[in-house]
Amino acid sequence: MSKRKASIITASLLATALFAASPALMAGHSHGSSSKHHDGQRNMSEMCDNMREGKGKFNMEERQAEMAKRHEAMAERLKLNDEQRGIWNEIHEERRQQHEKRMSGWEKKMKKRCAQPQE
């Protein structure tokens, strides 16, 4: 093996070992990040406020209207006839009911979490 190849292999192994031992790499994120995901306390209080006020993703009437509009647009693009559209609407109604069931459990958890004092 030539000296050049040995140097490249050695440098690669050394770099790999340094990366594997790096705590910052293993942590998955830097502590200086200003991302909303890393600011859990502020993000959680903001989410609780939105839930109480029914804003954003907690505004269910607005979200259901948007979903109905998207489903209708999709049915138009698919050029469904009346029979197919009836089946299409039944499928989406079942999905909506399943979604509401899941969301009620999630909402209970959120209310419980928001009722606890923030540390």
Image (tube, rainbow, N blue to C red):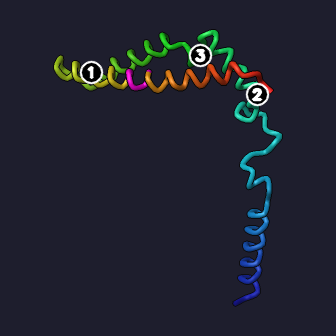
Residue drawn at 76 percent across, 69 percent down = 17
Task: Residue 20: give x, y in percent of width and height.
Answer: 74, 64
- Left or right: residue 41 versus residue 103 is right
Q: What element does badge 2 sit on?
A: helix
- Which residue reaches farthest right? 32
**Tag 1: residue type?**
Glu
Quick check: 58 left or right of 64?
right
- Type of the residue with mark 3: Gly
Classed neighbour count for the residue bearing mark 3: other residues with Cα under 10 Å, few (<14), some (14–19), many (≥20)? few
Residue found 60% across the figure and 12% down from its top: 55
Magenta stretch, residue numbers: 96-100
Residue 119 lies in quadrant = top right
Residue placed under numbered mark 3 in the picture: 56
**Closer to the observer: label 2 or label 3?**
2
Where does residue 37 sit, x and y in percent of width and height? 70, 34
Front-lying residue, 29 or 53? 53
Disc marking residue 103: none
Q: How crowded is mark 2: few (under 14 residues within 10 Å), some or many (20 or more)?
A: few
Q: Which of 90 and 85 is in front in this view?
A: 90
The disc labelled 2 sits on which kind of residue? Gln
Q: Distance between the residues labelled 2 and 3?
A: 19 Å
Q: Which of marks 2 and 1 is nearer the N terminus?
A: 2
Q: Quick one: 53 or 66, which is closer to the camera?
A: 53
Please tell me how many numbered marks the rendered image carries. Answer: 3
Which quadrant of the figure contains the N terminus? bottom right
> Circle 1 is placed at which residue position?
90
Q: Which of 45 and 117 is in front in this view?
A: 117
> In terms of sequence position, does the residue under pointer 1 or pointer 3 come before the other?
3
User: Marks 1 and 3, how far apart in space?
Assistant: 27 Å
